[in-house]
Amino acid sequence: MIIKLKQFKQKVMALPLIRKLNQFQAMPIIWWSLLVGLLPFVFSLLRIPIILRVGLLFIIVNNIISYHVGRLLISLKLPEYWLLVLPIIFCLAMLIRFAKYNLLFGLIYLIFEIFGLMDRHIYN
């Protein structure tokens, strides 16, 4: 199964459009943001209960991803306005199908991205 996933990944990465897109410096931020925007729909299609979706996906997984995006901004030396990409994509995804109270998570993800951006200078 893992071998098939690796082969699938290699085929996708070999597509000319994907190779062209990955040449841009900010593409890791965009890929992670799209993942955060699409995962709620995947969890809904898999009929995962709302409590698990909010607890596991919105609170744990997306916070880790948003912290990682903040750290990526440092390593890629991108401007700070890239912090807004992940929360905006997430909030747009929430407007399409999910409850409006989930929009609050967009603000939480922005805060975790700022924590990632601060790196180890939180107490300074």
Image (cartoon, helix red, strand yellow):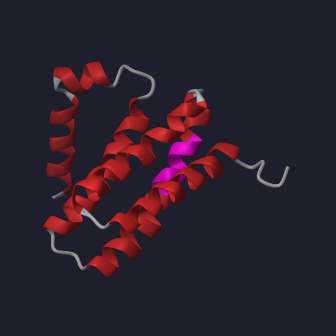
Name the residue: 33% across, 78% down.
Answer: 52
In the figure, 37 relative to 104: above or below? above
- In the shown orientation, is residue 49 left or right of residue 57? left
* Image location (x, y in percent) of residue 96: 23, 54
* Image location (x, y in percent) of residue 40: 27, 61
Name the residue: 39% across, 21% down.
Answer: 24
- By secondary structure, the bulk of the magenta-drawn segment is best described as helix
Name the residue: 83% across, 55% down.
Answer: 123
In the figure, 28 relative to 36: above or below? above
Quadrant where the N terminus sits is: bottom left
Q: Over which residues does the magenta segment extend? A: 64-71
- In the shown orientation, is residue 79 left or right of residue 49? right
Q: Is residue 10 magenta?
A: no
* Image location (x, y in percent) of residue 8: 15, 43
- In the shown orientation, is residue 100 left or right of residue 119? left
Which residue is at the far right? 124
Q: Is residue 68 magenta?
A: yes
In the figure, 12 relative to 61: above or below? above
The image quadrant of residue 85 is top left
In the figure, 84 relative to 37: above or below? above
Name the residue: 56% across, 35% down.
Answer: 73
In front: 2, or 34? 34
In front: 114, or 13? 114
In front: 119, or 19? 119
